[in-house]
Amino acid sequence: KAKSGGKPVILACASMGSFICYGISRDAIAAGDLKGMVILGGAVDPDFSKSALIKAKKPVYFTHGSLDKVYSADQQASIFRALLKAGVPTRFTLFQTGTHGTPVRMTDWRAVLNWIFVH
């Protein structure tokens, strides 16, 4: 944040790196410094809904491939639906027939960032 020049900070993590995002989301100070978070084809954290980031209702954007054999798209969609139901600004893009690496290659960053900035 100190190096952002006052610009919003958005943390994005892909695949196993999602564990880094989930860990940071638990730190109240770090979560307070973030404008939002993006999880690309990541693992599922069943305790994510208890994190400081989610309690602060910071926006979270998920992208996932429907044919991901590393991490389940259905499980990630389940977390998304729970956050949505809890009133957390969240969005989920599922790439039909996409595999594990698809979100990194196909995520429309302009759309994702603009959505986060609006929330």
Image (cartoon, helix red, strand yellow):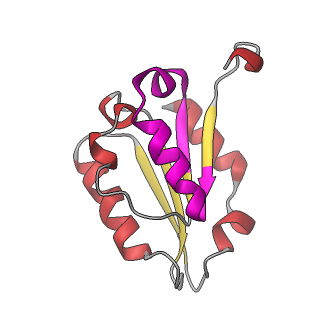
Tell me if residue 56 comes above or below residue 25 in the rendering: above
In the rendered image, the vertical position of residue 28 relative to residue 67, given as above or below:
above
Going by the image, does 110 lie left or right of 112? right
Q: Residue 61, position in %: x, y? A: 51, 50
Residue 59 figure quarter? top left
In front here: 10 or 22? 22
Asked if residue 85 is among those painted magenta in the image, a careful observer would answer: no
- Start-end of magenta stretch: 13-38
Give x and y (percent) for residue 33.
Answer: 54, 21
Residue drawn where x is 32% and y is 59% of the image:
79
User: In the figure, residue 82 lies in which quadrant?
Assistant: bottom left
Residue 60 against residue 58 in the figure, above or below: below
What residue is shown at x 53% (from left), y 55% (from top)? 18
Most frequent secondary structure within the magenta stretch:
helix
Residue 12, percent from left and from top: 62, 47
* Quarter of the image where the N terminus is located: top right
Q: Is 35 included in the stretch rendered in magenta? A: yes
Relative side of 7 to 37, left or right: right
Tell me the residue at 61%/52% (across/down). Answer: 13
User: On the picture, is 91 further left or further right than 104?
Assistant: left
